[in-house]
Each structure stands twice: as C-alpha cells, then as structure tokens.
Amino acid sequence: MSLVIGVIVVALIFEYINGFHDTANSIATVVSTKVLSPRQAVMLAALFNLLGALWGTAVATTIGKGLVDTQFVTLPAILCALLAAIIWGLITWWLGLPSSSSHALIGGLCGATLASAASDWSVIKWSVINPATHKLEGIWPKVVIPMVTSPVFGVLIGFLFMALLLVLLRHWTPHWVNATFGKLQLVSASLMGFSHGTNDAQKTMGIIALTTFTATQSGLFQELPAWLSFLDTPKFEVHTWVKITCALTMAAGTAAGGWRIINTLGHKMVKLQPIHGFAAETTAATVIQVASHWGIPLSTTHVISTSIMGVGATKRLSAVKWGVVERMLWAWIFTLPVTGLLGYFGLILVQVCF
C-alpha cells in the first residue's frame, strides 16, 4: 500500500515539474511581446491549464494502456519510469532547453516495462489495431510519427498563417497591428494554455490510473479501508479524483513558472511582435487540439517551438537563431533513448538491490 501511495506522490511531482517546465509553451510569446507581465502570463496559463486538464481522457488512455503490455507493468516499473522523466526534465530545465516531458515519460515507461519483461521487446506495442475501437494504436502511430510530423506542421502552418496575415494586413499601420494583436494574443495565449492542459496533464492521469489498476490486479487493495475505496480500479479508467488532482497539481507547477525556458523560447530564438505571438500560439493550439481529440500524446514543446520558427521565418530565414534551434533539436532527439535507458537500468538496479 505504501508503494502505491509513493508512486502516486512521485507522479504528482512529475506533474508539478511538467507544469513549470512547460509553462513556457503557453506564455513565452505573450511575455516576449510584452502583452502581459511574466506574473500575469503565468496566472493566465495556470487557469487555462487547469480547465484544459479537466477536458477529456483520450490522451490519458493512450499513455495508460496504449503503448505497452499492462501485464508487465509493475509498480516499481512505473516508479522508475517517472523518475527517469523527472531526471531528464530537471536536466533540460536547468540547461534552459525546451524538451518534451511527454516523450520523457513515454521513454521511461517503455524502458522500465522492457526491463520488467526481461528484455522481451514484444511487450512494447509498436503498431496494433485496438479490437474494441478498431483504431491503430502503439508507439509508431501515436508517438514516433507525430513526433516527426507535428514539428513539420508547426513550421509550415505557422509560416503560411503568418504570411496570410501579412498579406491581409499590409495596409495597416504598425500601431494598429500591435494594438489589435496585443488584445488578440490574450485569446491565443489562453487557447494555448487550454490545449496544453488537454494534452500534457492527461499523461500523468494515465500513469496514476495505470498505477491503481496495476495495484488492484495485483491484489494490493483486497483489504482496503473504506475511506480509501476510491483507489480501487478493477478496470482501467481515469477517475474524477485523478483528473482534479492532476489538474490542480499542473496548475500549481505552472504558477511556479519556468523562466529559463521562457527566455529561450520567447527571446533567444527569434524576436517577436504581438502579431507573431498570435500566429504562433494559434497554430500550436490548433495542432495540439487535433492531437488531443485523437488521443495522441503530442509534445507541446515541439509544436510551439516549431510554430515560432515558422512564424519567425516570414521575416527572413536569418531572423531565426539557428544555433539555439540546433541545441533544442539535440534535446528532442535524445529524450526518448535517454529516458528509456534510465527507466530500463533503473528497474534493473531496483531488482538487484531489492
């Protein structure tokens, strides 16, 4: 029982870190364009992250049972997966790199489950048809392909949307453009925060639901006190208490801010005006909402970062500081393999020691 509580606590620590690590996804542009102060922007993001986190469970279901064989998911494996994601999240936060908390968690879960199954690679669902929904699930359709295509969509749609705005508003004075899109950016930043909540917060919901389901299947809740009956999960589902707890935790993490990453996304990569911020946020929020609808655990970091690149490239290609972009790309490339190895060897170490 204590292990179950411990895993849930660690999951909420991950959710909190995810909140301040990914705050920049929602507010970097609105801060850099000086539409809102950093404190105002963080509060706005926290509110809309909270609302988004309570909206649906499609992504949570994918994380909880759509990527690995749940028969080989043990509580120590879940714990090692979370710790792998937390370690990588803190390292990249310290370096000011916008890495993907989503992919960190997925990598950790796959690595730890692989170790739990004695290196039997068949426990990882690469690409399968769900017999209940008749939809394609697994690592390839839900993680790898979106990991490649979503940044491409971010760049292309951001570039085309910004180019369209420039054509439509070519007769406007800079004063009216800045004044109008300064107000509109409040809407786009709110939508970005909401979209982040619908996707990122649900990943921890899926992990906690998987934890209680695993504990129930293992018989750990056979003599559960009445006041803890809400933990009993005979079939995989995301209970209301899981939604509310994760939503509040992510909102608290968001409120703590993530100034290192905000500086990278909002200032170092490309200089933005309100119209650029509006275009980037609207592009990213749209892509993320589509992914959330289909239960795809997208990297909000990848999408907003590439949307900013696409929008910035409409000025000129040299307006984007490609040296900063290169550092970010390396962080993205290494996230899945590094966290996979951390999860795998973490569980091996636990098995040897205990």
Image: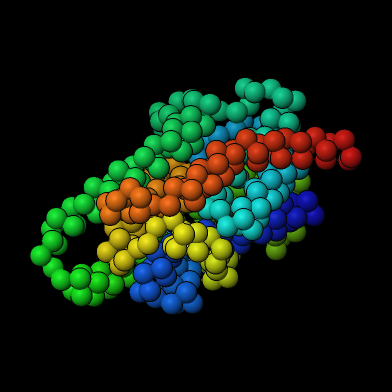
Spot occupied by residue 151 in the image (x, y as percentages of width and height): 40, 42
- Work out whether 167 lies above or below 58: below
**206 sits to left or right of 79:** left
- Determine the image quadrant of residue 15: bottom right
Judged from this view, the residue extending furthest toward the left is 171
**316 sits to left or right of 224:** left
Closer to the camera, 89 or 7?
A: 89
Q: Residue, x 48% and y 33% (percent of image)? A: 144
Spot occupied by residue 44 in the image (x, y as percentages of width and height): 43, 72
Q: Residue, x 43% and y 36% (percent of image)? A: 148
Spot occupied by residue 65 in the image (x, y as percentages of width and height): 56, 38
Closer to the camera, 146 or 5?
A: 146
Q: Residue, x 87% and y 35% (percent of image)? A: 352
Judged from this view, the residue extending furthest toward the front is 318
Does residue 22 appear in this view? Answer: yes
- Determine the image quadrant of residue 285: bottom left
